């Protein structure tokens, strides 16, 4: 596809969707959202890049090996589950605390965010690996 309008809009939309993905990622602990939906949103933003530009341009702009995100995500998710077992709690037991960040204010963070980050990496890595394989440029 060689659309000038799509090429012009694709990059700002990428940053907009990724920003919304970050919001959904952090919102997901007590509300709907989290790592899975945020990973799908980010993957969708990169699919838009693949549709707008050729795969060589996308790979040169974002030189990340998507396949490496999958094992990193699995290790993070598994590690967050095993962390509770090390302390004598059941698998995937999590704890939380409130922290004050200067520009953001008071923020409640849970160790479940590590699990969500792992899910995010697995979903993003899997989706973009599939898309790059379908596109013919592995």
Image (cartoon, rainbow, N blue to C red):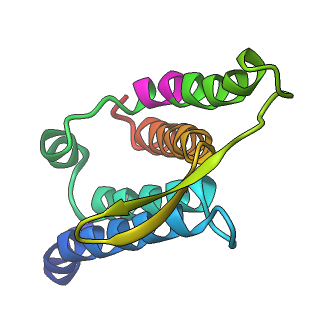
In the displayed structure image, the side of residue 119 where residue 133 appears, left or right: left
Write the residue at 45% across / 65% down: 107
Q: Quadrant of residue 15?
A: bottom left
Vertical comparison of 36 with 70: above or below? below
Quadrant showing the N terminus: bottom left
- Residue 117, x across and y down, in percent: 52, 43
In the displayed structure image, the side of residue 51 where residue 35 appears, left or right: right
Q: In which quarter of the image is residue 34?
A: bottom right
Vertical comparison of 13 with 59: above or below? below
Vertical comparison of 103 with 37: above or below? below
Q: Closest to the observer: 72 or 10?
A: 72
Does residue 69 belong to the magenta stretch? Answer: yes
Write the residue at 39% across / 36% down: 136
Q: How many labels does the image show?
A: 0
Q: What stretch is highlighted in magenta?
A: 68-72
Q: Closest to the observer: 13 or 95?
A: 95
Residue furthest out toward the right = 90
Q: Closest to the observer: 101 or 136?
A: 101
Write the residue at 28% across / 68% down: 14
Quadrant showing the C terminus: top left
Does residue 97 belong to the magenta stretch? Answer: no
- Residue 76, x across and y down, in percent: 55, 28
- SS assignment for the magenta stretch, majority: helix
Write the residue at 45% across / 43% down: 128
In the displayed structure image, the side of residue 36 where residue 13 appears, left or right: left
In the displayed structure image, the side of residue 50 where residue 59 appears, left or right: left
Residue furthest out toward the bottom = 5
Vertical comparison of 131 with 34: above or below? above
């Amino acid at each position: 596809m060689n659309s000038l309008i799509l090429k012009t809009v694709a990059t700002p939309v990428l940053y907009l969707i990724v920003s919304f993905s970050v919001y959904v990622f952090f919102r997901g602990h007590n509300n709907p959202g989290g790592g899975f939906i945020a990973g799908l949103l980010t993957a969708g933003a990169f699919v838009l890049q693949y549709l707008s530009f050729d795969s060589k341009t996308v790979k040169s702009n974002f030189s990340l090996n998507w396949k490496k995100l999958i094992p990193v995500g699995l290790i993070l998710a598994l590690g967050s589950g095993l962390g509770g077992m090390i302390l004598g709690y059941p698998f995937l037991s999590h704890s939380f605390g409130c922290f004050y960040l200067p520009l953001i204010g008071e923020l409640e963070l849970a160790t479940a965010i590590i699990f969500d980050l792992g899910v995010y990496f697995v979903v993003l890595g899997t989706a973009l690996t599939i898309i790059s394989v379908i596109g013919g440029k592995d």
